[in-house]
Amino acid sequence: MAKKKAKKVAKTVAKKQVKKSAAKSTKKVVAKKATLKKSALKKSASVVNITKTLEISLIELIKNTSAILPDDVQKVILEALEREEKNTTAEYAMNIIKANIELAKKKSQPLCQDTGTVLFYVSHPQNFDQIKFTKEIQKAVVKATEKGYLRQNSVDSLTGENSGMNVGPGHPSIHYHQHNKKTVEVKLMLKGGGCENVGAQYSLPHTALDAGRDLDGVRKVILDAVHKAQGKGCGPGVLGICIGGDRGAGYIESKEQLLRRLDDKNAVASLAELEAEIVQTSNKLGIGPMGFGGKTTLLGCKISALNRLPASFFVSISYMCWAFRRQGIELSEKNQIKKWLY
Ligand code: SF4
């Protein structure tokens, strides 16, 4: 009888212990879940923060690009002003350009009413989400337009309708390149419509210009483009040129040449020579600032070459006006601006 009673007591104690430990482990699970939820919330808050920081950095890049000319461009403009003869229309035009540059910088306002095609060049490491980054760029462009850093400048080509946001098929234009660094670099160029209109593409040989498939032929067509542009591209301008490639690649590469600093030197000796010669000869054409005559028609010329088909020989020329707006930033891990690139 006593044995039976003891067995019953033991059973009850065991049951109680099981219940207790079950309650304990439920408590543990609940606590673990709460911690996980907390850290997920923390993580998503930091993702939101990093995304917000990216937007702020991109808007800052747009604002500065629109208002402040990079140092290398300002330097050649001031040198050109010094070169012009005193009391000429050319000197007057260069002085207006100088005053414009100073005023835009001081007031942090767009340097020209035409804030141009918005061209982004993003260099990134492996495993980079281009789709997400594109969305962030588009968001920043809309905000920068709302704030007045960019003019409402992008219209539907079929209807002419302007959404007022600067975002639509092909705009902003975003070019991605993977590089071996761990950081993300974003370069921005604002390219005005007037200068874009005087860009040109030649197919060599060009009989009318007596231009063959060699560097002398290339020189002839480039000078022809400068001559045809006259003051329409809001000179003094800078040329970005690609020899070769197909028609599409040629134009893309010619624009990318404009990302080079004006004071750099081409690593290919024959191209370095051609770049210098084009600037020198163009400045003797007497077209001058805004086409008013004078000594400065070009501020710079940058040339590269791409392979081509034996059947084709294109020379693609992108003309950039004096309002040569380009800037770049290197982003930190948290998407802050770590460094300005120009
Ligand atoms: S071409 Fe350049 S300077 Fe001329 S209106 Fe357009 S952005 Fe302004």
Image (tube, grey):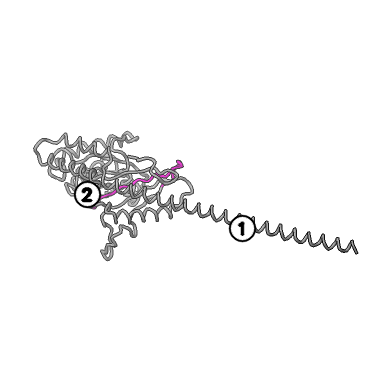
Residue at the disc numbered 1? 30
Whether label 2 lies within 8 Å of ligand 1 gets the answer yes
Q: Is residue 147 highlighted in magenta?
A: no
Amino acid type, label 1: Val
Q: Position of residue 160 (x, y in %)?
A: 25, 64
Of the 4 image quadrants, the one containing the C terminus is top left
Front residue of 128 and 229: 128
For residue 187, what is the image quadrant? top left
Q: Kindly identify the residue that appears in the image at 61 percent across and 58 percent down.
A: 30
Disc 2 is placed on an element classified as loop
Disc 1 is placed on an element classified as helix
Mark 2 surroundings within 10 Å by alpha-carbon count, few (fewer than 14), some (14 through 19), many (20 or more) = some
Tag in front: 2 or 1:
1
Boundaries of the magenta span:
177-194
Front residue of 117 and 277: 117
Residue at the disc numbered 2? 112
Q: Is residue 210 visible?
A: no
Taking 1 as reference, is 125 above or below it?
above
Q: Kindly identify the residue that appears in the image at 17 percent across and 37 percent down.
A: 81
* Disc 2 to disc 1, C-alpha distance: 61 Å
Taking 241 as reference, is 144 above or below it?
below
Mark 1 surroundings within 10 Å by alpha-carbon count, few (fewer than 14), some (14 through 19), many (20 or more) = few
Q: Is residue 121 visible?
A: yes
Numbered label attached to residue 314: none
Q: Residue furthest front?
A: 2
Q: Kindly identify the residue that appears in the image at 49 percent across and 49 percent down.
A: 127
